[in-house]
Amino acid sequence: MRDYQSEATIQIYGRLTAHEFMLEILLSQFLAQFSQEQATSFAAKIVSQMRTAWTADDADSRAPEDAALRAAHDAQLLASRLLEKALERAGAIRAK
C-alpha cells in the first residue's frame, strides 16, 4: 500500500523548489538589467517591505511561539535568501 500523504508532500516540495528556481532565474534576469548599486537598492527595499508585509501592526513580534509570526519570519528569511541568490546570479549575468 502506498503512502499517499508522503507522495503528496514530495510533490509539494518538488513544485515549490521548481517555482523558487524559476523565480530566481527570472528575478536574476530582471536585476541584471540594472547596475549593481540599483539592483542592491531594489533588493534592500523589498527586504525592508517584507518585514511588515505579513504581520499586523499590533502583532507582538517577540512572541516566537505564535505559529503565524513564525511562518511570516520564515517567509522573510526564505525571500531574503532568494534575493541574495538572485543578486549573485545577476552579477554573473552582468559580468558576461
Image (tube, rainbow, N blue to C red):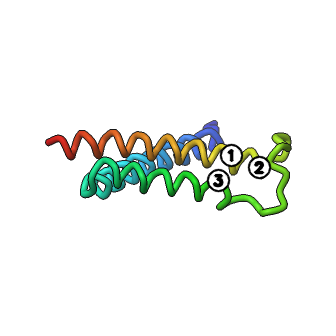
Give x and y (percent) for residue 58: 84, 61
**Would you say 66 lies left or right of 50 here?**
right
Q: Amino acid at mark 1?
A: His
Q: Amino acid at mark 2?
A: Leu
Inter-mark Cα distance, 1 to 3: 8 Å
Inter-mark Cα distance, 1 to 2: 6 Å
Using the rendered view, name the quadrant where residue 50 is placed.
Answer: bottom right
Counting residues from the start of the chain, the first of labels 3 and 2 encountered is 3
**Would you say 37 lies left or right of 72 here?**
left
Dot label at residue 69:
2
Q: Are marks 1 and 2 in contact (CB under 8 Å)?
A: yes
Q: Amino acid at mark 3?
A: Arg
Quick check: 39 above or below 74?
A: below
Give x and y (percent) for residue 55: 74, 59
Inter-mark Cα distance, 3 to 2: 11 Å
Question: Looking at this view, is 61 or 69 the one in front?
Answer: 61
Q: Residue at x 42, y 56 (%)?
A: 42
Question: Looking at this view, is 53 or 42 the one in front?
Answer: 42
Q: Alpha-carbon neighbours of circle 2 within 10 Å: few (<14), some, or many (≥20)? A: some
Q: Alpha-carbon neighbours of circle 1 within 10 Å: few (<14), some, or many (≥20)? A: some
Q: Residue at x 39, y 46 (%)?
A: 21
Q: Which residue is mark 1?
A: 73
Q: Which residue is mark 3?
A: 51
Q: Which secondary structure lies at badge 1?
A: helix
Q: Are marks 3 and 2 in contact (CB under 8 Å)?
A: no
